[in-house]
Image: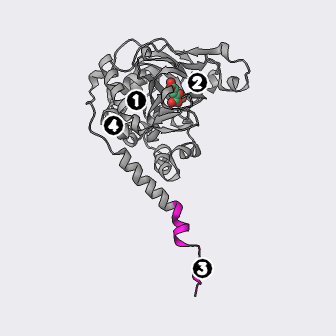
């Protein structure tokens, strides 16, 4: 016979698990797709010329460090200013981003305030990110086939910066991203805020880490209109946002993966789990790491997107 008080108390022992389930329920409820948005169409994908790219070699990475697939080098580092969306598309997108501000959470890690998993809340964003035309355009800019990242909550994030909303200045600290292929799109017209410039360090990651005078190598992304953006290899290139001094600033980030280079995906389990919790991270992790027969097809299935291959960006 077992004495009852020799066994840890039921409610205590199961508390963490219970909490995880509760959290999951709240999460689902909050993230239920909201219908009250404009309707996405492919007509909102821009076809402006793509500016000249800056390569990883320009940033100081030797070619021998870069990945190849089918003889193609993964060497695009930065492209800016880019336009992914037409003017009308950008305006509607900005409205959707504003609408999702109520889902934003605060953090003192890197970005002060942001909404994660935007495409899991908004049908507009969901359909946008899985639009074949948009994916082909993004892939052409990056020079590699891209799909929405299978770590779902990180794929669409919206950052909000407004000095009026709190006692502390809302910022984006200097950082490298967990994700490698990142599009950062300005969702506020620059006439509506001061400060809030996107800067990146024109050098290798280790040079930034070991350097004492970085200023002379910092470049400011030329984002001059609502909808202007920068593509950058987020996991390699240090970047940050200067404090917003007046007005407010909103930015959309789209984090992508390349099925061609998935073995180089820089995400770690612990990095994702720190944001999303362990339970929620397991299915995302399996989507990323479970072996594939054909990575282009299988990752498209896992991210609910069309198949994009090298043929699409020739
Ligand atoms: O807000 C910005 O301009 C930068 C955002 C960023 O770097 C990020 O979300 O990781
Ligand atoms: Fe970032």
Answer yes or no: is residue 71 visible: no
Identify the residue position indicated by label 3 in the image: 5
- Foreground label between 4 and 1: 4
Which numbered tag is attached to residue 239?
2
Instruction: Write down the region rendered in magenta.
Output: 1-16
Separation of disc 4 and disc 3 at Cα?
A: 49 Å
Q: Identify the mark nearer the N-term, 2 or 3.
A: 3
Separation of disc 4 and disc 1 at Cα?
A: 27 Å
The answer to whether mark 4 is within 8 Å of ligand 1 is no
How far across and down, in percent of the image, does residue 103 sit? 41, 39
Looking at the rendering, in which quadrant would you find the C terminus? top left
Could you say which is closer to the camera, residue 226 or residue 48?
Answer: 226
Identify the residue position indicated by label 4 in the image: 122
Could you say which is closer to the camera, residue 28 or residue 55?
Answer: 28
- What secondary structure is marked by label 2? strand
Q: Is residue 1 above or below residue 237?
A: below
Left or right of residue 4: residue 137: left
- Foreground label between 2 and 3: 3
Q: Identify the mark nearer the N-term, 4 or 3.
A: 3
The answer to whether mark 2 is within 8 Å of ligand 1 is yes
Q: Tell me, yes or no, whether the two marked residues, 3 and 1, touch with CB atoms within 8 Å.
A: no
Report how many numbered discs are placed on residues in the image: 4
């Amino acid at each position: 016979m077992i004495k009852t008080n020799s066994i840890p108390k039921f409610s205590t022992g199961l508390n963490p698990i219970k909490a995880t389930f509760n959290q999951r329920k709240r999460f689902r409820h909050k993230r239920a797709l909201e219908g009250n948005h404009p309707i996405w169409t492919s007509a909102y994908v821009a076809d402006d010329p793509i500016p000249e790219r800056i390569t990883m070699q320009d940033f100081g990475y030797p070619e021998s460090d870069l990945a190849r697939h089918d003889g193609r080098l993964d060497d695009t580092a930065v492209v800016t200013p880019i336009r992914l969306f037409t003017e009308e598309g950008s305006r509607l997108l900005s409205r959707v981003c504003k609408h999702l501000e109520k889902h934003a959470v605060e953090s003192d890690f890197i970005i002060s305030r942001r909404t994660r998993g935007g495409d899991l809340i908004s049908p507009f964003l969901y359909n946008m990110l899985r639009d074949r035309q948009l994916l082909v355009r993004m892939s052409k800019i990056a020079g590699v086939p891209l799909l929405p990242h299978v770590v779902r909550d990180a794929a669409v994030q919206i950052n909000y910066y407004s000095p009026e909303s709190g006692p502390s200045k809302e910022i984006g600290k200097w950082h490298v991203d967990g994700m490698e292929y990142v599009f950062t799109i300005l969702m506020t017209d620059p006439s509506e805020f001061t400060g809030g410039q996107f800067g990146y360090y024109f050098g290798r990651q280790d040079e930034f880490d070991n350097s004492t005078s970085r200023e002379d190598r910092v470049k400011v992304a030329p984002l001059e209109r609502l909808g202007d953006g920068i593509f950058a290899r987020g996991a390699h290139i240090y970047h940050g946002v200067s404090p917003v001094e007046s007005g407010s600033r909103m930015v959309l980030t789209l984090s992508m993966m390349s099925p061609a280079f998935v073995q180089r995906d820089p995400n770690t389990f612990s990095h994702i789990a720190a944001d999303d919790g362990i339970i929620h991270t397991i299915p995302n992790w399996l989507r990323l790491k479970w072996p594939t027969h054909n990575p282009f097809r299988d990752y498209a299935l896992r991210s609910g997107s069309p198949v994009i291959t090298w043929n699409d960006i020739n």
